[in-house]
Image (cartoon, grey):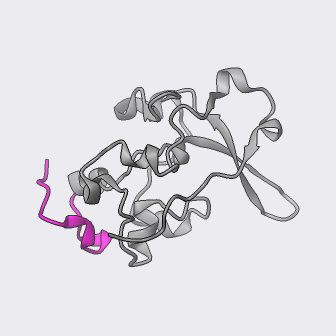
Amino acid sequence: MGTLRDRFWERPLAQLNQEEWEALCDGCGRCCLHKVEYEDTGEIEETNVACKLLDCETARCTDYKHRKAFVPDCLRLTLKLVDRVPWLPDTCAYRRRAEDRPLPRWHYLISGDREAVIRAGVSVAGRVISEDEAGPLEHHIVEWADGEEQPA
């Protein structure tokens, strides 16, 4: 396993080792929510319906290491995919760094506080329902706040 270099998050994504790549995630949980895509327009809307593996209270995957065995279509975000995923939120550290933008001040790598993402209103923790309980996705369309946009 690699090591975390000082201020690694300021480096281009292509320069990150695997441990740094994983550490870049702010843990908001939005990538683990189902989306609705309209065939006629290609428009994508977000829902408050979480993957069955997402702990709805903490916004953490309950089996991250083995998630693909239980959810085969779970997206493993990679350097090659980060520019091709249109539904990544504007706050996503991977998206921001791919666009050469800094991390927001609430990101735990900047603030030192893993709970700051929740206080900024970006995390889905405590605000979602499991796909096992939700019913039709169309009844769960939401607009998520993108938190403060000011970098540190």
Find the residue positioned furthest to the right. 40
Residue 64 coordinates in the image, percent (x, y): 38, 34
Left or right: 8 with respect to 134? left
Q: Residue at x 42, y 48 (%)?
A: 117
Q: For residue 5: magenta?
A: yes
Left or right: 28 with respect to 146? left
Picture quarter with the C terminus: bottom left
Q: How many marks?
A: 0
Q: Residue 101's quadrant in the figure? A: bottom left
Q: Residue 12's quadrant in the figure? A: bottom left
Q: Residue at x 52, y 58 (%)?
A: 147
Residue 73 coordinates in the image, percent (x, y): 57, 41
Magenta stretch, main secondary structure, is: loop
Residue range corresponding to the magenta coloring: 1-17
Q: Residue at x 52, y 41 (%)?
A: 74
Vertical arrangement, residue 38 with respect to residue 52, above or below: below
Left or right: 54 with respect to 22? right
Residue 69 coordinates in the image, percent (x, y): 46, 29
Q: Residue at x 57, y 27 (%)?
A: 52
Q: Residue 99's quadrant in the figure? A: bottom left
* Of the pair 11 and 123, the residue shown nearer to us: 123
